Image (cartoon, helix red, strand yellow):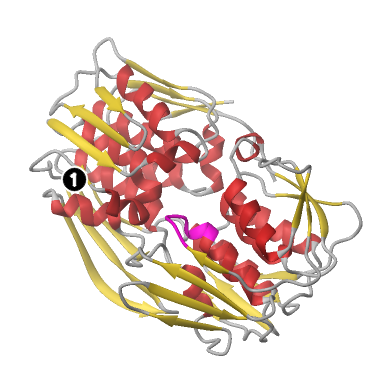
């Protein structure tokens, strides 16, 4: 289901606010719940699911593969698991991942070791441009084949392996590749071993945690994840918390707006997802986590934010990348409004997101008079305490990148610079209620079809 295209126009700065909100549910957990539930035994329940385009793409793909998914009530779904290796593809089946790289990588992980799978794979224009080379190479080690040979972006054809054997994999920064290997390993013979020197987001492992015969995790200097293939998976019942990545934009809006206060309730505070907040707190931002508790192996809590200027320019080392991946565009906006030179290291992989987020954010910052310098793996932003909105305009072209659309919205609202953001409908892939929430906080905008 693709949204009708529209642009967003903003002309005015937002007024101070004191509010409390909940943000859209976590996209990563929502997608993983459906995918993992489909290969479990019996019926799994997922509550408070994010009802966004990326999640609908997930549901549609699984239904095409023979999975029964029922909506029980608002945001609550039952997933009738078929068990490992039981997904079925009709001849010449086409699967469309839409904009979702998470869906693409994780479902390909499942299908690569599922018998008798021959499927044609594609995404939207944005996803089709993104390289899948690392994923294809990994699944080829399991025995899957991809056609045409040496083509690493969609559309491609996947032919699964009939005799999948577990592999050893040393993980990098990508949690999606790690998850794809874990999910492929579940239906492989023998043991699949994942070695993590730096921990990336662990939602997949958390959902699988009670399957002690299938997954074992050893913590230490190196994190060792062992997957024991061909074991039945137990069903689960999960309630999805608010998405910390979606919450980051409202956090930034509050910090940069004068005399404002915001409470964001029931947000996922998984330690692998809160680098944005840790980094800003380290630099003097007023951000507090309250009411923390653990549910379904995930940490949940409330976030309290007050208007506050950073005490110094942002210094982000490469160690923050794994925990801050989705939030760099909005971090760049905060850096632009913080006096001094902010430095972001280890960010080279941002070039392979929905757009090249380094180059595209540089273009936006240049439009408001902020200089920046980017190398292969590093970016410097020369920020100012104050940016005049006179004789300035922000124009965001058709990028198909929800994070850049949302970041530009926040930048416009806190500076009052007139802004036009094209293809804003792409925000519905991750945060369908974004505009409703910022309107509730007092933002004024115009939608142009």
Give the structural element (helix, strand or loop) at label 1: loop
268 lies above or below 1: below
The image quadrant of residue 425 is: top right
| Residue ranking furthest to the top | 391
- Residue 276 percent location from the top left of the image: 28, 52
| Residue ranking furthest to the left | 311
Residue under pointer 1: 260
- Residue 134 percent location from the top left of the image: 58, 50
Q: Is residue 329 visible?
A: yes
- Residue 377 percent location from the top left of the image: 34, 38
Magenta stretch: residue 137 in it? no
255 lies above or below 56: above
Q: Which residue is drawn at 27% across and 44% down?
A: 252
Q: Is residue 159 left or right of residue 410?
A: right
Q: Is residue 123 left or right of residue 175?
A: right
Q: Residue at x 58, y 82 (%)?
A: 236
Q: Residue at x 45, y 36 (%)?
A: 351
* Front residue of this view, candidates 69 and 218: 218
370 lies above or below 168: above
Categorize mark 1 by other alpha carbons within 10 Å: few (<14), some (14-19), many (20+).
Answer: some
Q: In this view, does 124 lie to the left or right of 443?
A: right
Q: Give the range drawn in magenta.
A: 171-177
Q: In this view, does 35 lie to the left or right of 409?
A: right
The image quadrant of residue 300 is: bottom left
Q: Quadrant of the C terminus?
A: top right
Q: Can residue 100 be seen in this view?
A: no
The image quadrant of residue 122 is: top right
- Residue 295 percent location from the top left of the image: 40, 79
Count of all numbered marks drawn on residues in the image: 1
| Residue ranking furthest to the bottom | 213
């Amino acid at each position: 289901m693709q949204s009708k295209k529209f642009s967003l126009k903003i002309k005015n700065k937002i007024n101070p606010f004191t509010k409390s909100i909940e943000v859209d549910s976590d996209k990563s957990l929502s997608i993983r719940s459906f995918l993992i539930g489909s290969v479990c035994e019996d019926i799994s329940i997922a509550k408070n699911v994010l009802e966004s385009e990326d999640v609908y793409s997930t549901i549609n793909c699984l239904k095409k593969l023979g999975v029964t998914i029922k909506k029980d009530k608002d945001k609550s779904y039952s997933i009738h698991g078929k068990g490992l290796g039981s997904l079925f593809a009709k001849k010449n089946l086409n699967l469309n991942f839409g904009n979702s790289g998470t869906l693409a990588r994780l479902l390909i992980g499942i299908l690569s070791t599922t018998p008798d799978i021959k499927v044609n794979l594609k995404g939207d224009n944005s996803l089709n441009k993104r390289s899948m080379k690392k994923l294809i190479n990994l699944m080829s080690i399991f025995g899957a084949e991809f056609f045409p040979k040496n083509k690493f972006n969609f559309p491609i054809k996947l032919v699964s392996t009939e005799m999948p054997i577990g592999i050893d994999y040393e993980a990098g920064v990508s949690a999606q590749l790690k998850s794809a290997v874990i999910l492929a390993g579940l239906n492989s013979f023998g043991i699949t071993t994942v070695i993590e020197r730096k921990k990336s987001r662990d939602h997949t492992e958390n959902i699988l945690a009670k399957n002690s015969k299938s997954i074992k995790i050893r913590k230490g200097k190196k994190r060792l994840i062992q997957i024991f293939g061909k074991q039945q998976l137990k069903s689960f019942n999960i309630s999805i918390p608010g998405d910390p990545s979606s919450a980051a934009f409202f956090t930034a809006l509050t910090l940069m707006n004068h005399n404002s206060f915001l409470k964001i309730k029931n947000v996922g505070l998984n330690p692998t997802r809160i680098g944005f907040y840790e980094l800003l707190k380290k630099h003097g931002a007023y951000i507090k986590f309250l009411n923390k508790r653990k549910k379904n192996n995930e940490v949940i809590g409330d976030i309290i934010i007050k208007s506050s200027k950073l005490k110094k320019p942002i210094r982000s080392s490469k160690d923050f990348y794994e925990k801050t991946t989705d939030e760099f565009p909005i971090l760049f906006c905060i850096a632009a409004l913080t006096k001094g030179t902010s430095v972001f290291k280890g960010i080279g992989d941002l070039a392979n997101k929905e757009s090249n987020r380094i180059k595209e954010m540089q273009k936006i910052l240049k439009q408001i008079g902020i200089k920046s310098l980017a190398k292969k793996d590093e970016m410097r932003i020369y920020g100012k305490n104050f940016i005049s909105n006179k004789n300035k305009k922000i124009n965001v072209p058709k990028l198909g990148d929800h994070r850049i659309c949302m970041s530009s919205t926040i930048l416009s609202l806190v500076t009052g610079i007139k802004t036009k953001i094209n293809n804003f409908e792409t925000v519905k892939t991750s945060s369908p209620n974004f505009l409703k929430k910022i309107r509730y906080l007092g933002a004024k905008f115009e939608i142009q079809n």
